[in-house]
Amino acid sequence: FDSKCGYVDKTGHEVIPCKYYLANSFCEGLAHVVKMVAEKKNLFDVFLKNYGSTRHLVYKVVKDTYGLSMSEAINLVNNAPCKLKEGSDKEEASSLIKALEKAGAEVEIKISDCASDTFIEMEKHGYVDKTGCEVIPCIYDDVRSFSEGLAAVEHNGKWGYIDRTGREGIPFK
């Protein structure tokens, strides 16, 4: 995560500082950018064994259970032990185990007594204008390009549409 992206003009002069993990092309006056944001999490260790043929189902279970983007779920699952946020109670952890086992994974979960200052780097998506102003803050889990004034965005596992000011255009579901 050491290299950063920004924008330069035709002469090579930096117009928008290199502070983004990813910086895409402008579309309808806005560019999709990605920041790596440290989020505070309570964690537990998830050890997944023998899930090769059911890998996609395991990714989906982790994605849906924790409201992650698919890339975040894949990253967490592929780094054993996975570090996932702890549920509000043991029943939620139990539901995760059952869902993963139903998807064909052998699972072992160890609840850890993590300090409250544990942080995980997460990709967060937003949009900047041509002056570099973050007109739509990097708070979304995933986004799509603007088309006809609206962009599909994912937030907390739900998709909806926002307008160019960040206001909800079509409700999240």
Image (cartoon, rainbow, N blue to C red):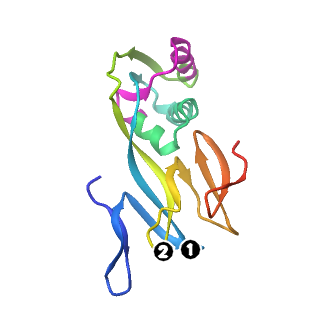
Q: Position of residue 155 (x, y in %)?
A: 58, 44
Residue 51 in magenta stretch: no
Residue 98 in magenta stretch: yes
User: What is the number of the mark on residue 130?
Assistant: 2
Disc 2 residue type?
A: Lys
Report the magenta residues as a range. Answer: 77-99
Above or below, 150 against 29 in this view is: above
Above or below, 151 against 43 in this view is: below
Q: In percent of the image, x 46 and y 19: which residue is there? A: 106
Q: In percent of the image, x 56 and y 30: which residue is there? A: 61
- Decide which of tag 1 and tag 2 comes sooner along the chain: 1
Q: Residue furthest bottom?
A: 11
Dot 1 and dot 2 residues touching (CB under 8 Å): yes
Disc 1 residue type?
A: Gly
**Left-right relation of 163 to 70:** right
Residue with the mark numbered 1: 29
